[in-house]
Image (spheres, helix red, strand yellow):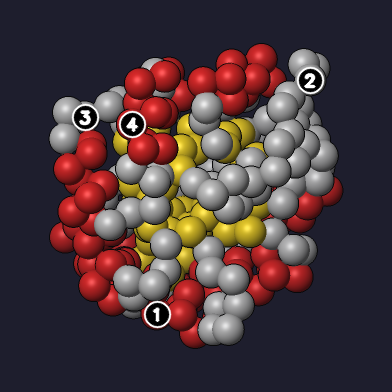
Amino acid sequence: MSSVSAEAPNSHWPYPRFIAHRGGGTLAPENTLAGFREARHFGFQGIETDVMLTADGAAVLSHDPVLGRVVKSSSPVASLTLKEIKTLDAGSLTAQKWAGERIPTLEEAIEACEANGLFMNIEIKPASDSAAQATAQETVRIVRKLFAGKSLPLLSSFSRNALAAAAVEAPEIPRGLLLEGIPTDWKEVCIKLAVKTVHPDWQSVTPDFVEEAHTMGLGVMCYTVDSPDTADALFTLGVDAVCTNRLDLFANCR
């Protein structure tokens, strides 16, 4: 392992420098309470997780709109009620030792992260474009309720509509724009949505991008960085934080 830089958070990024992707990365079932415990076991101080809505409007953790990759079901999340979601095995497809792990609600996830001292980057992940506003509104409602009087999490999304809805509902909760590639209008979008951070894929990042983001007062977190050497190179460019699947390679980094 390389000697990954571990400077303190800065004014652009007042959060942990290393974020566990989907909670447990590749070492535990993603977007589960077991994954959050695994992140804490490896010394992480922050996690990223994904939120979408069930058929009855409950906010649950899931990256995929259609289950089957990591959860034993082939149903769309939006077609299942919370009661049905809670019967599904979210662990054994990752490894048999995780059999019986369940998909948590956002409330359960927040409580688990608080118990484990984990900062949360909550990605608003609407199952469809038409669900962007409702997903953002329910996420914000829960965050406002459970984080009242506490340090706020960071909300993020690829969905511009979701970020716009979150800004209307709760402008005080910080937001970040996720980018796939670097679109030509990224600066205009960041200004319009009043985001605090920008989250590009690491392969797209250039020194000019980082400098422009910092000039705008934006923090920069790259995804998904699974090599300490890559992390070192990104930190040299001025990137503020990285999101990783490889909790083992970044154990106890700060």
Do the CB atoms of the residues marked 1 and 2 lie less than 8 Å apart? no
Q: CA distance from mark 2 to mark 3?
A: 32 Å
Q: CA distance from mark 4 to mark 2?
A: 27 Å
Q: Reading the chain from its start, which is encountered first: label 2 or label 3?
A: 2
Residue 3, disc:
2
Q: Dot 3 corresponds to which residue?
A: 183
- Graded by Cα atoms within 10 Å as few (under 14), some (14 to 19) or many (20 or more), the crowding at tag 4 reads few
Q: Position of residue 141 (x, y in %)?
A: 39, 80
Label 2 residue SS: loop
- Which residue is more in the foreground, 81 or 155? 155
Q: Dot 1 corresponds to which residue?
A: 141
Quadrant of the snapshot with the C terminus: top right
Q: Position of residue 177 (x, y in %)?
A: 34, 46
Q: Reading the chain from its start, which is encountered first: label 1 or label 4?
A: 1
Q: Dot 4 corresponds to which residue?
A: 212
Q: CA distance from mark 1 to mark 2?
A: 41 Å
Do the CB atoms of the residues marked 1 and 4 lie less than 8 Å apart? no
Name the mark nearer the viewer: 1 or 4. 4
